[in-house]
Amino acid sequence: MKITKEFLQSLLDHIQDSIKIVEKDRTIVFINRAAQESIGKKLANSMGNKCYKEFWHRQGPCPHCMMDETFKSGQHQSATIKLEEEAERSVTLDLSTFPVKDSTGEVIYGIEILRDVSERELLMNELVQTRALAIMGKYSAELTHEIKNPLNSIAIQINLIQKLAERADARLKNDMQDIIRVLKEEVDRLNNLSREYLQISKSPPLELQKSSLHAVLNTVFDLVQPLMSLSHIELNTAIDPDLPDMMIDRDKLKQVFINIINNAVEAMPAGGMLAVSIQHTAAAVLLSFTDTGPGIPQENKDKIFQPFFSTKNTGTGLGLTVAKNIVEAHGGSIWFERHEHGSTFFVQLPNILTQGEQ
């Protein structure tokens, strides 16, 4: 097949990343549709103009531009930059530049590819916050446990002192009762604080909305894909295209799926494959996550969903416990099966189309 300029233009126009090719002085010689749409101009109006004027409204090369180094060294350059736009909106971009050389090895053009990764960064921040809350929940629960034991002992001792005060003379009795009242108030205050801290480790009520489970999973895949690539893990998906919308808490289920996938990735430090599938019937939706790791040891199979149980040195032991609580709050169930090489986690959710309607 003969490759024409029109064919290449059409091919690159179907790429969602912003692509432009510039000369050394930043004159635009090629621009694809995604880049064109980012500046809201027609293709012909951008060709021959300076990229820093067209894209960034500057009078000279941008401070974050890496084209100088690409033209100088003839090497690929990459960086992540953060820009502040209107309404205090922050935009994060993955920026890459590539050289185009002639037969003598001189760089004659530079290719710049821009990818908006703002949503990915937002999801990463959400993941960090989820983990931080899990850690906080663990230590809050442990702290509450450690505080409540001595508080119970103190409360018992106060009751004994109160009985002794009943046998004291009137003046001493009044003084002791004032002290006892203050002690009881402080113990009650500490008990209330303990209960508040304990709430950190519990999931808040669900916020159900009619949503696409497929879309939730795609969001999670976008988030974990960089980590899986670094870990040399292949992702295979088999999702029923006719999957209906459901009444779910998107953020809570996203937390469940991230937890399961992160555990699978950590179980395959040398690489492997993660297979994710979804099937549905009129009554339920079944998701499965199968990894090719070493599998869950027999002695741990009854502890996996227990609070604070973890086989990792840095694990909180709350991830799967929280996931179980979330799934069960949706009226579903979560379980796993051990294989000779790997494990499969299943999440089954009721196929609720509208609030209160099957």
Image (cartoon, helix red, strand yellow):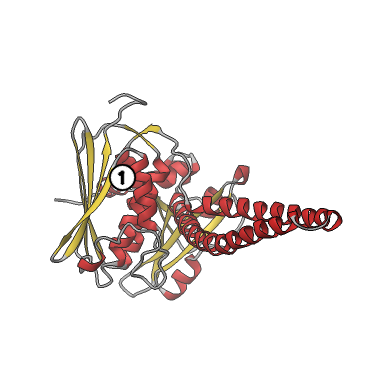
| Residue 32 appears in the rendering | no
Q: Is residue 331 left or right of residue 85?
A: left
Q: Is residue 20 left or right of residue 49?
A: left
Q: Residue at x 31, y 39 (%)?
A: 213
Residue 17 percent location from the top left of the image: 38, 50
Mark 1 neighbour density, 10 Å: few (under 14) some (14–19) many (20 or more): few
Q: Is residue 94 above or below residue 237?
A: below
Q: Is residue 271 left or right of residue 38?
A: left
Q: From the viewer's side, name the closer residue of 61 and 45.
A: 61
Q: Tell me the kind of residue under disc 1.
A: His
Q: Residue at x 34, y 60 (%)?
A: 262
Image quadrant holding the C terminus, namely: top left
Q: Secondary structure at mark 1?
A: loop
Residue 84 percent location from the top left of the image: 59, 51
Which residue of the protein is positioned furthest toward the top in this rendering? 357
Q: Is residue 130 above or below residue 73?
A: above
Total labels: the figure holds 1
Q: Is residue 86 above or below residue 111?
A: above
Q: Is residue 212 above or below residue 4?
A: above
Q: Which residue, given by chain and number where applicable, does mark 1 sit on?
A: 14
| Residue 214 appears in the rendering | yes
Q: From the viewer's side, name the closer residue of 146 and 285.
A: 146
Q: Residue at x 38, y 57 (%)?
A: 319
Q: From the viewer's side, name the closer residue of 356 and 50.
A: 356
Residue 250 percent location from the top left of the image: 39, 41
Q: Residue at x 26, y 68 (%)?
A: 268
Q: From the viewer's side, name the closer residue of 124 and 21.
A: 124
Residue 299 percent location from the top left of the image: 23, 68
